[in-house]
Image: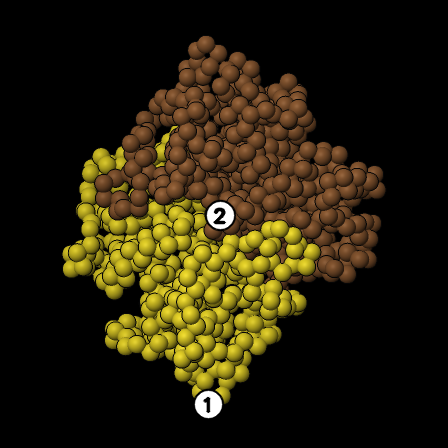
Chain colours: A yellow, B brown
Amino acid sequence: MSGPKLDRRSLLTAGLGVAAVAAATSAPAEAQTKAKVAKPAINKGLPDVAVIGAGAFGGWAALSLRERGYKTTLVDAYGPGNPHASSGGETRNIRAGYGDRGIYSDWAAKAWVLWHERQEEFGRKLIYPSGSLRDPGPEQMAAQIAVFDKLKLPYEMLTPEEVAKRWPQIRTDDIPKIFYDINSGGVKAREASIAVAEIFERKGGVTKLGYAEIGESAAGKLKSVMVNGEKLEAGEFVFACGPWLSKLFPAFLGNKIRANRAELFFVGPARGDNRYRWESCPSISDQITYTTADIGGGYKVAARLGGEVMDMDDGDRMPTHFLLQQVEKYVKLRLPGLAGRPIIQSYVCQTEQTDTGHFIIDKHPDFTNALIAGGGSGHAFKMGPYLGPYIADRIAGKPQDAYEKKVFSIAEHGAVGAPRGRRNAEMTA
Amino acid sequence: MTKKPTFTRRRVLATGAAAAAAGPLAAQVPALPGAPALSRRLPDVVVVGAGAFGGWTALSLRERGARVTLVDAYGPGNPRASSGGESRNLRSAYGERELYTRWAEQAWTMWDKRQAEFGRRLVFPNGSFSFTRPQSLATQKAVFDKLKIPYEVLDAAEARKRWPQVNFADAETVLYEPRSGIVKAREAMIAVSEAFMHKGGQMRIGKAEPGAAAGGRMQDVLVNGERLSAGAFVFACGPWLPRLMPELLGEKIISPRVELFFLGSAPGDLRYRWEMLPNITEGGGGYTSSDIGSGLKVRLNQAYRIMEPDSGDRFPTHSMEKDAYDYARRRFPGLVGQPIVQTYVCQVEYTDNHHFLIDQHPELANVVVAGGGSGHAFKMGPVLGERLADRVTGQPVAAEEATGFALTAHGKA
């Protein structure tokens, strides 16, 4: 960790503010996008908050906290949605189908509404309601139907013939009945994370780039974090740094979060063939893998090796021909019209997996003023707009649902091993 | 190709982010209040291609009151376009080609205004420097002096002092341009298209082909087989131009493949970010873009290999990966051992002399052809949009643009 420190002033401007680069102080530096939104007043009765990690958990939490009047600083090692992060890349899926885990169906349905509201507020397109097909496996299917019925979420059960009639480009002959989740689709990932950080700054939030480490503590309270060696003090802390949580807190999270490497391939349809675009094609999540309909970058198909761990900081992110072949095989089975079409983009990332697939949202065992939020397990991104207020509620000390408190607690999570199959713990968006 | 649905005009017009219950929705985003009124004096225009040339032209035309439909095969900034990917560099040094220096200088200011208007960050003003030989330095200085563009000539010792993270062992002097930087690429084109639609423009995704012509005028284009008629047409489809108009442009534009590598830096090491490091122009087409959040981008000279824009494979190669690591080791010793964090494969569409190709179609009076970006058009987007809108609306064209960009000024690429 040898880098020089950007001083506080220039760090503040890393996002949307004035670029304090000595040599570049000409026009563009001075006319950055200005705050067009109302800045919530800082409520002096509330503690200052430092949020570590500008992803699905942290970025949205920082925005919600700022909107509630907290003076908030958002710290990220590489910036929102960067390629090391679990919330980078082009898209994530949003869907409510979670088998028997109704809690996430409920959250996803709420997040669905919030994404649309935030899209409008941010003034840029972020959500692509393509619908999605899901095969959670026979034992989970019945449970998922029960959850949807109970929550009154729209869905349809489709036979292969019905799928073929509606979307002739999709084959589901091997799946007797597939679940069509109507209120679902893709959301932009990196650009949404950037939008959240930009709006956070416009609302008066402060962003800081740098590597955060635990600072001083006293009497069961954390006093500060060190950001690239510089002290940042706050009254409350949120540690929402995805797969880095296990690095930051090896004592109690070291074996509870595992970063599984994944590769994403974007298949390019023929020119004029709009059948794989989100307007015409649902995303798919089955027993083999998952896809995201084309929002402009090609039809995305995910692939991964079961056991491969990603080192977030140092790991090489070159796509491999081995996984490319898996994708080609899958495309042939599920989307035969795309067989032989070129890979037009690829991306290598990780999901940070817990043993149960449940998130971790809990107090730091030693510090009463530090909250841990992470363990997204491949399905947190969609929840972002709901997670933000949820985490802000924890900071505000609001009562928490007993079941959620339990399943999100550190104690309820055990050591996580390599994923054994697609369905295992990994619920992958 | 099997039968595919065509997005009908009605479906394209249908907007909003409602639930997908009823099947396909449109790529269109809704117009906002305050969109420019339609001017009856101006022709309806169809612009084919939503990149650096076409996207900005469609926006400028709509802002002037024309009814405009923007057509793109895959959508703005898509991975097969020449205007996709993370970023492009903005700089004004063009040697003796003063026209581009003037345009780049205008574009610098216009990008800034558009960024404020679009309400999202697009420009990263980090400066840039190039390694220059004495002869080319003299030429460049003359142009910059004439146009009053700020620059500095630094010896290796001074450069080393300012940017100790860069190895200047092979440098005698560097030319530093403070008014330069990085712009987002794909997201900028998406922002342009969204602003265009907010202002009442229509966007369509589909394969466009020249349609019927009569009396020396084009009547329509076919978009996925459906006729789209207009009073004027702009074909701004980058590497697809020679494919759409083979007789006219078949030999004038070639599109070599380019691989881009993004290098990570150690956690907490911010020295390669845009706030700390200018972009570097190496000799012979290689360059870097400092880290704007995705790593330090490296573009190296590479073996000549044509990219077929529709069906060409865009998988990065290990040989170029190795070259990228080698380059980083040489130029940025502090990045030794750091990983590639992202890759991207694109193409550049070159003309024979690297001048743009902007001209009226020789047989169709209401058709303008615009392209041949030659790897330096993206930065010019806001200027290109205005200049092309001038042409379509019959404004006079500067002599140097009329001759320099003419079809007849370009030979076999």
Q: Is residue A224 visible?
A: yes
Answer few, some or many: residues within 10 Å of disc 2's Cα (few below 14, many 20 plus, some between 14 and 19).
few
Residue extending furthest toward the top: B215
State left or right for residue B244 relative to residue B96: left
Examine the rendered structure and indicate whether residue A72 appears above or below residue B199: below
Q: Is residue B327 visible?
A: no
The residue tagged 2 is B117
Q: Where does residue B186 sit, x and y in percent of width and height?
A: 50, 43
Residue A228 figure quarter: bottom right
Question: Which SS class for mark 2?
Answer: helix
The residue tagged 1 is A219
Question: Circle 1 marks a residue in which chain?
Answer: A
Examine the rendered structure and indicate whether residue B281 appears above or below residue B13: below
Question: Which quarter of the rendered picture does the C terminus of chain B lie within?
Answer: top right
Residue extending furthest toward the bottom: A219
User: Marks 1 and 2, Cα distance to the nearest angstrom?
Assistant: 50 Å
Q: Where does residue B263 sit, x and y in percent of width and height?
A: 60, 54
Question: Which SS class for mark 1?
Answer: loop
State left or right for residue A198 relative to residue A129: right
Q: What residue lies at 53% left-to-right and 13% top-to-bottom?
A: B363
Identity, as a three-letter code, of the amino acid under mark 1: Ala
